[in-house]
Amino acid sequence: MTTHEPVDVLVIGSGPAGATYARTIGDAVPSARILMVEVGPPVPGGRGDHTQNLSDEDRTAAQLITQGPDAGIERAAALSDLATGIDPSLEFRHTILPGLFFVDPRPATSPGEVGLPAASMASGVGGMGIHWATSSPRPQQSERVPFVDAAEMDAALDRAEQLLGTTTPAVPGDGLPEAVRSVIAEEFDGPGLVPTGFMPTSTRWEGDVLRFAGTGTILGDLERSVPGFELRSETLARRVLVEDGVAVGAVLEDRRSGRVHEVRAGRVVVCADGLRTPQVLFASGIRPPALGHHLNEHFQVTSFVTLDDEFDPARFPPAPRDVRSVLTPFSDTRPMQGGVVLLANSAYRMGPGDDASARLAVLAWYGAKDVRFADAVEFSDTETDFYGMPRMRIRYAHTDRDRATIEEMRRNSARAASRIGTLVEPPTLAAGGSSLHYQGTVRMGETDDGSSVCDPLLRVWGVENLYVGGNGVIPTATASNPTLTTVALAWRAAVAIADELTVAARATVATTV
């Protein structure tokens, strides 16, 4: 097996967390040799650019490329094949988002389980960071990691907002968004509750064009400023190499040629996503008791509402196309996050030529899961998936607390609708997995007591020089969108690596002088 020239840091995965590691280390140590590998192919547009920024033609092409086993297949055709003989309870699967593919096309569940039948992922340069909705709220109250100092976490969130280009609209606002926010605040704000505002988004204006932050926003000009940085696409990390309890590199496979080779690395960072990161560790024989367990995603109850005449967009001054939505944040006494997405003048394109009705809005409530060890993604020692990696099986159930949360979300949807319009349909619980936010599978912990996979700086317990990143490291039950928190936690860990590399470089210089 060929062994390539060693690198200082090997990053497995090219999504927001992996990009944060690479950017942070590269900025601090421009002489570092950093190799990032991505199992999927490059996509049209700039490196890691968000698909919303592309032309309709390039956007469609990018989505087809990142569909993994369905790559190159028009989504309608793939779903038609899947629907043949499908269980009627799985008819929701016609709604899979373009650019994604299912973890398991025909998931099985055991008695008492609900599974995550809509669990999906993407494979392509930039990962999910080229498809995400750019919502970037800060975690609130018990969503925050309790064993990370509050001031330190706030500083990390500040840096994450800079990396993602996050903007938070002021309150009060103006026009239709403020009119809706005001009445939603009247309905839901109260003592001990985080007040209603607007959703922070990772977007920016370039002249008259609204740009969406993708993974490329985080990477910045890293490829130009750090000569030793390389992003190698269509490269599968088969396993991490561990010698005497130390991660020393990885076995990589070029998916174009099938060639397998080793790369030695001073530090290995696995940021494949909330499901594939534990898969890589499992394939490497790194199997702490908590690996894959404590799997959770927030519940999602959505519905459409037709706005009352009071909120007719025609009554308000014209505004530029925007992504502004109303946000009722998570609070401990109300463990859910509510939102009103106004489709009038929306900058989001759901598809080529999409033009949403001006009088429609989307009500979306996200509820925190009752986190349990038993909820898990498990891996097979004998069966493999499309990529030849250990096949996944998801074990997932709802508790009494979960069912109560879901019912409260439905009630809150009806309450919100009653203040701004008329429900088009009853509030519906989205299929499990459809939020695309899978947490807890490589969770961080304060001590190595068997309940976590990594420490507060995302170092895997029991294996030196091995780090993880992504939504899977978040240890708390959350309702808010996790990307900002994920980037903040990755930044903290990357700073620690950069500091170690800087000290090592100074020591090397000292011994040669």
Image (spheres, rainbow, N blue to C red):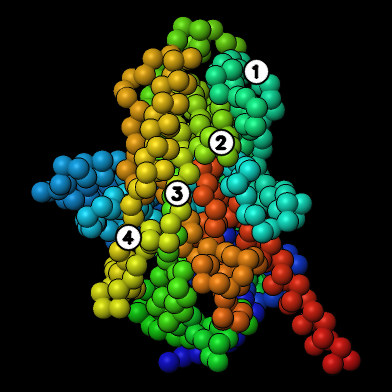
* Marks 3 and 1, how far apart at CA: 37 Å
Mark 1 or mark 2, earlier in chain? 1
Q: Which mark is residue 174?
A: 1
Badge 4: residue crowd in 10 Å (few <14, some 14–19, many ≥20): many
Q: Do labels 4 and 1 touch, CB within 8 Å?
A: no
Q: Secondary structure at mark 2?
A: loop
* Marks 3 and 2, how far apart at CA: 14 Å
The residue at which mark 3 appears reads as 370
Mark 3 or mark 1, earlier in chain? 1
Q: Nearer the viewer, mark 2 or mark 4?
A: 2
Q: Secondary structure at mark 4?
A: strand
Percent across and percent down for residue 225 are: 71, 65
Q: Which mark is residue 394?
A: 4
In screen coordinates, is 458 left or right of 55? right
Percent across and percent down for residue 49 are: 53, 50
Mark 4 or mark 1, earlier in chain? 1
Q: Which mark is residue 333?
A: 2
Q: Nearer the viewer, residue 421 or 214?
A: 421
